[in-house]
Amino acid sequence: MKNGKTYREIEEMVFRETRAWDTQNADLLMTIWHPDMVWPWPKTPQSHDPVDWVLEWGRYDYERWKRGWQKLFDTHTLIRNKREIKKIVISKEEDGAFAVVDIDTLWREKNGRDNHWKGRVCKVYTKVGLEWKCIMHTGVLEY
């Protein structure tokens, strides 16, 4: 581990995102993303080959992404949201980092159908001025 302060800042990013999901707070969730964020999603948790991945929303757009997450919150009930940091890696310059996080997030649609995010993700962060922003995030994969 490099600088303990930097490590704690990355942990806080993961914890803040978790709080946003737990409280279904789209405004809090929007504080995490870098303006150049792109979020590819595998078609299934077993789609390890990126040739099978998709881009649902394109490059980060505050209003579009907020509307999308708010729609999820308005149409689903959060049943559980367990997240465990498995590893944090910080660049020697302390201007880039990634966190490997195992997640088990279960949403239930109003019609009773489940939307289960279960597996491992990698959250990639970049330092912008004095704060960290998530610039890339993999979709959920099972390993």
Image (spheres, helix red, strand yellow):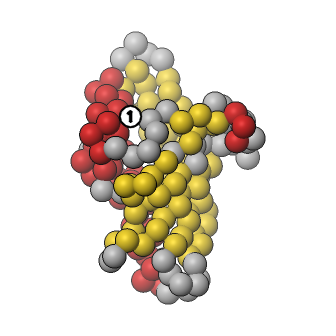
x 34%, y 39%: residue? 65
Which residue is tagged 1? 78
In the foreground, 111 or 137: 137
Quarter location, residue 133: bottom left
Q: Position of residue 112 (x, y in %)?
A: 43, 16
Please tell me whether residue 128 is drawn above or below residue 24 in the rendered image. below
Please tell me whether residue 89 is drawn above or below residue 34 in the rendered image. below
Q: Position of residue 100 (x, y in %)?
A: 59, 59
In the foreground, 128 or 46: 128
Specify whether residue 89 is in view: yes
For label 1, count other residues whose C-alpha is less than 10 Å away and answer few (under 14), some (14-19) or many (20+): some
Quarter location, residue 25: top left
Describe residue 114's horizontal placement relative to residue 13 as left or right: right
Quarter location, residue 122: bottom right
Q: Position of residue 106 (x, y in %)?
A: 48, 34
x 27%, y 40%: residue? 63
Describe residue 62's horizontal placement relative to residue 115 as left or right: left
Please tell me whether residue 2 is drawn above or below residue 18 in the rendered image. below
In the foreground, 58 or 127: 58
- Amino acid type of the residue tagged 1 in the rendering: Leu
x 61%, y 67%: residue? 87
Specify whether residue 22 is in view: no
Q: Position of residue 138 (x, y in %)?
A: 58, 48
Q: How many marks?
A: 1
In the foreground, 39 or 108: 39
Furthest residue toward top = 111
**Image quarter in which the N terminus is found:** bottom right
Say which element carries label 1.
strand
Please tell me whether residue 40 is drawn above or below residue 95 in the rendered image. above
